[in-house]
Image (spheres, rainbow, N blue to C red):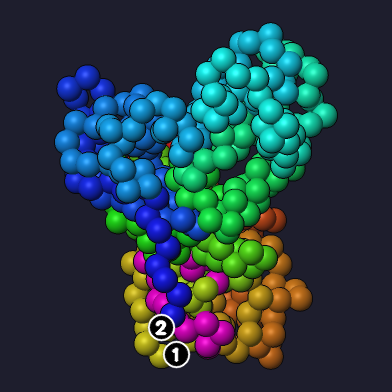
Amino acid sequence: MSAPAETLLAYRTADVGYAETPVVRGADLDVCAGEIVGLVGPNGAGKSTLLRAVTGDSRLLAGTLAVAGRDVRELAPLERARLVGVVPQQIGAAFSLPAREFVALGRHPHVPRFSAPGEHDREVVQRAMELTDTARLADKPADELSGGDVQRLALAQALAQEPRVLLLDEPTSHLDLNHRMQILDLTRQLADEGMAVLAVFHDLELAGRYADRVSVVADGRVGEPGPPERVITAESLRDVFGVRAVVGTDPVTGSVSVTPVVREQAVERGTRGKVFVVGGSGVAAPLLRRLVLAGWQVSAGALNSGDADQLVADALRVEYPAIPPFAPMDAAAAVEASRLATSADVVVVCEVPFGHGNIDNLLVAVRAKKPTVLVGDIEGRDFAGGAAASYWREALDHGALVVASADEVDPSAALTAAHPSDSSPASGGLGSGPGV
């Protein structure tokens, strides 16, 4: 069994803030050699404040904070600079220094006073610029470069310090896609070689892809760090960020993927009526979102676990009968779907293929005898031996409206067509709700 990695950064019941006012209380957080720990959370929660406590730019008001086993308050500035490299959120590069000299400032903690940089110092600077793809900028004035170039120079300067701990505060905020991957791949390499990295991320997918552990900073507290897939969940995004999202696994990287669906504040609390949607195979997801945003109370037919429509339905808190992945509807699911359909004001059948596994979704929609909207044409979608076409004709015989695409679905129009004299509060159209 290998020995445990050395803890290079340790917060213990730490209160951190400015003047005498704590921003974060009771922080317990370790960062070990060989790992990246990501901090995520809403703006102003204290993520950057935690990092600044290591450099002395925010105050440690209570508890302890140790760097490589030493109390940060006992470290002289040069000692701290030899141990810790920083890439801040805002980089002051208003210097008319050539980029190479800007990076060489990182050697200051290692060069004796009144001495000139030596050959080793120049080699370290050159290596740092090569790693960050900034060597080609060496002779250009730093204050004439783009924000992205300066951000990479700031990382090169931090690497020139040869630190054991690297603090990154939104390290890719100004970078294009190519350099974003380059910098984070480099950060991953540095951690794998033994550096301890504490990084603030606003992009949750980047945190999930590159961090070994993630901690949520919110409401003045630092959550217990854990693997990204355990920390970045639909529940945490709703509770911390006020966002309903689909959280899954990226099929290429295997890391956490996050698809925001709606902001909690954008969802109308009242209801304009009830809509039952027959979907599946991902065809209903955009419509479910639009209906919820417009203030309709939405339910759905049976959905297989893992289906895109099911994931979005969960994010939107849409009620539906759940069935296992790839399984056909069973009797219990059909009964529950029938209950939801008959309690709705409007039924919508999306452009989903129908086979023997899901034909009961169409049956309960048609037999609910509610104002109905059919999307598309049943031709080419009936894989149930003609049953789907038969139910479709039955719906048409009962006055169902037909629209070409889900974008044209308007429950109010269906209600008006079924009850022309009805002046119910559900009138007003799909598009009058917030965020549509």
Q: Nearer the viewer, residue 113 or 365?
A: 113
Q: Quickly name the residue at label 1.
A: 330
Q: Name the element at disc 2.
A: helix
Give the residues in magenta.
307-328
Whole-percent x and y of residue 345? 39, 59
Specify whether 55 is left or right of 90: left
> Does residue 413 lie above or below 229 as drawn?
above
The answer to whether residue 275 is visible is no
The numbered dot on residue 333 is: 2
Q: Nearer the viewer, residue 258 or 302?
A: 258
| Magenta stretch encompasses residue 318 | yes
The N terminus appears in which quarter of the rendering?
A: bottom left
As displayed, is residue 392 above or below residue 192? below
CB atoms of marks 1 and 2 within 8 Å = yes
- Nearer to us in this view, 436 or 70: 70
Question: Which residue is at the front of the view, 228 or 345?
Answer: 228
Any magenta on residue 165? no
**Left or right of residue 138, residue 349 in this image:** left
Residue type beneath disc 1: Asp
Query: Which residue shows up at 41% across the image and 45% down it?
Result: 40
The picture quadrant where one finds residue 334 is bottom left
Residue 327 x/y as whole percent: 52, 88
The image quarter containing residue 267 is top left
- Inspect the image, locate mark 2, and give the three-letter code of the amino acid beneath it: Ala
Identified at 60% across, 19% down, the residue is 115
